[in-house]
Image (spheres, grey):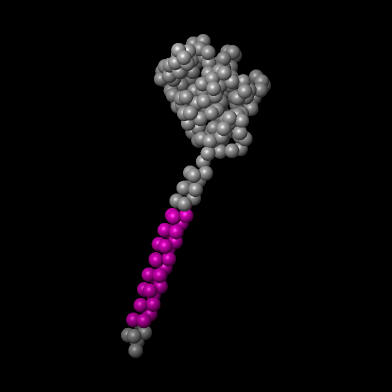
């Protein structure tokens, strides 16, 4: 009789453990499936914001995409917006003084500004304090007519452009279309010159 009771208890305990293991395994599969489903839905919901659309809409930055509308203020307190660049070549760079790769690109961007190309340069800083920008060598670029610096303290423009890491940069043609992105070093100068030369040939 004792043997039967022990056997029954062992069997019940084993069955309970088996059921728990199956439960957690099934729940793990279920959670994974739901997460995958959520990612798929999110991907299908991604859309491109056309020129003039609300800043709150999702926006995918890639070559061929139209520059989104934005309005901000530069270091001099002047208003700067997308409308300022209609019919112009524009280079937009997201950066920060604490970002090593960003600062490594700055001598090339300085050279780009000094080349006298028909190009507007917009440097959008993610520094927390404006003093960090003002105390850096980059602030000198703001004195040049072709360059504007924006302190994107709350990263509002960063969210609009879907910037998740820096440095990130874009080349925009006179129609407002992105024709190049994430170019660094000498490649940046070469590609911008090529783009402008090709447009002049036409």
Image: magenta residue range = 7-35
The spot of residue 98 in percent (x, y) is 51, 28
Q: 37 or 175: which is nearer to us?
A: 175
Which residue is painted at 43% across and 54% down in the image?
32
Quadrant for the N terminus in the image: bottom left
Please tell me how many numbered marks the rendered image carries: 0
Q: Is residue 116 left or right of residue 20?
A: right
Quarter where residue 22 is shown: bottom left
The spot of residue 123 in percent (x, y) is 55, 23
Q: Is residue 104 left or right of residue 78?
A: left
Q: 78 or 43: which is nearer to us?
A: 43
Q: 83 or 165: which is nearer to us?
A: 83
Which residue is painted at 53% across and 39% down in the image?
47
Whether 163 is drawn above or below 102: the answer is below
Considering every residue shown, the one lying at the far left of the view is: 3
The spot of residue 191 in percent (x, y) is 43, 19
Considering every residue shown, the one lying at the far bottom of the view is: 1
The spot of residue 186 in percent (x, y) is 41, 18
Magenta stretch contains residue 61: no
Task: Look at the magenta stretch and give its main secondary structure.
Answer: helix
Which residue is painted at 54% across and 32% down in the image?
161
> Is there any visible trace of residue 167 in the rendered image?
no
Which residue is painted at 47% across and 55% down in the image?
34
> Is there any visible trace of residue 182 in the rendered image?
yes
Magenta stretch contains residue 32: yes
């Amino acid at each position: 009789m004792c043997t039967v009771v022990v056997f029954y208890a062992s069997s019940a305990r084993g069955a309970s453990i088996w059921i728990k293991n199956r439960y957690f395994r099934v729940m793990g599969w279920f959670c994974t499936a739901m997460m995958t489903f959520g990612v798929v839905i999110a991907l299908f919901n991604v859309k491109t914001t056309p020129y003039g659309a609300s800043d709150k809409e999702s926006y995918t930055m890639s070559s061929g995409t139209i520059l989104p509308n934005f309005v901000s203020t530069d270091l001099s307190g002047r208003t700067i917006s997308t409308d300022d660049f209609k019919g112009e070549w524009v280079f937009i760079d997201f950066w920060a003084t604490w970002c090593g790769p960003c600062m490594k690109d700055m001598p090339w961007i300085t050279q780009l500004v000094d080349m006298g190309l028909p190009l507007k340069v917009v440097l959008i800083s993610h520094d927390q304090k404006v003093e960090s920008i003002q105390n850096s060598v980059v602030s000198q670029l703001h004195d040049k007519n072709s360059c504007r610096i924006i302190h994107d303290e709350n990263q509002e423009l960063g969210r609009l452009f879907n910037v998740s890491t820096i440095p990130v940069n874009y080349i925009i043609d006179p129609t407002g279309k992105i024709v190049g992105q994430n170019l660094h070093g000498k490649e940046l100068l070469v590609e911008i010159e090529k783009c402008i030369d090709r447009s002049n040939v036409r």
